[in-house]
Amino acid sequence: MDRAERSKDLLWLRQSSSFFASRIILTANRFRVFDHLAAPGKTAPQLSRTLRTDARATELLLNSLVAIGLLIKRKDVFRNTAVASRYLVSQKAAYQGDILRHYSTLWDNWSGLDTVVKTGKPYRKAHDHEAFILGMHNLALLRVKKVLAALDLRGVRRVLDLGGGPGTYAMAFAKKSKETVLMDFPETLKIAKRLIDTAGLGRKISLFPGDFTRDDIGSGYDLVLISQIIHAYDDTACISMLKKCYRALNPGGKVVVQEFLLSETHTAPPWGALFAINMLVNTPGGRTYTPKEMTSWIRKAGFREISSRILDETVLITATKKLD
């Protein structure tokens, strides 16, 4: 066996310690390291004094961030790489620090995976709701333009962003002059309202507090978006949700489901397969689903003209309510 074959053969061993890099990034984000290391940068002692952290530990942390590729080190001065500057500085448009805060919370819950596998019950011991919702905003900003570009919005006047969290997609629809409704839990809408008001869209988006699994979701919509919601529920709840959407739509209206892509074997792509475990840990019945599974539910709900499109590691499924 040559070196390349051995390296591939032992990939699982390297992956088993990948939490080293994960914890380093999460800790650096926790201390806002990247906010302090814009050019010209700082030495480890300088940053240690700013953060009030241990000098030796800070230097080792910074060295490891260089190894990961998020910092540059020149003559003992550390500064952000272009990638860190774009995604990990809190004032930047593409900031991803909130989703890292959420991942740090998930770290605590994932520590109970042994118990989850034995009992089949979730281990949701920690939850930071603001980090979760703002983290969803971080991720949605990376794909919202591509998603909207894939949708045919001709004839669409009124849109429901169901369980839309931070309202990232609702804001995108509103910017396209669509009458937009954002439905989610009241505590979620408080966070969304801050983002919507900051964007100057407060008068263009209606906030609809409620639990869409139990409450009425309204009616008269031309399009209902269900983005990254399906994976949090079991199949029975998903079918019920889709039936509600069918009833809420105008004849000829469309439902759009965006979810993580998962193969028919449930083993690829890696993110879709691994995210199923995240749902196992954090929800009573959620997991990731294949396009075939979701399409069957959409058809059971009464929809027709079902089509799907792959966008990176997600799938976009669109279906139409039949005309009267």
Image (spheres, helix red, strand yellow):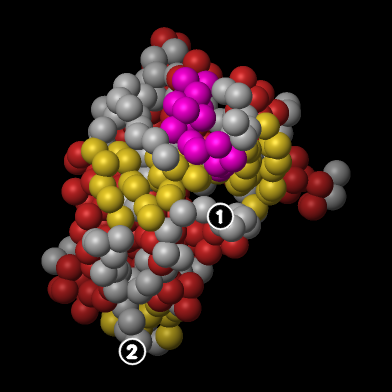
Q: Amino acid at mark 2?
A: Pro
On the image, the x and y values in percent for residue 267 come to 68, 31
Q: Can residue 263 be seen in this snapshot?
A: yes
Residue at x 46%, y 77% (from the top left corner)? 81
- Residue sitting nearer the eye, 291 or 297: 297
Which residue position holds label 1?
Answer: 155
Which residue occupies 59% across, 40% down? 252
Mark 1 residue element: loop
Query: Quadrant location of the N terminus?
Result: top right
Q: Whole-Å distance between the Cαs marked 2 and 1?
A: 52 Å
> x, y (%) of residue 22?
43, 50
Q: Which quadrant: the C terminus? A: top right
Depth order, front residue of 213/2: 213
Q: Is residue 4 above or below residue 297?
A: below
As drawn, is 67 to the left or to the right of 40?
right
Report the residue at 39% width, 19% height from top: 284
Where does the magenta region start and end? Answer: 238-256
Label 2 neighbourhood size at 10 Å, few (<14), some (14-19), many (20+)?
few
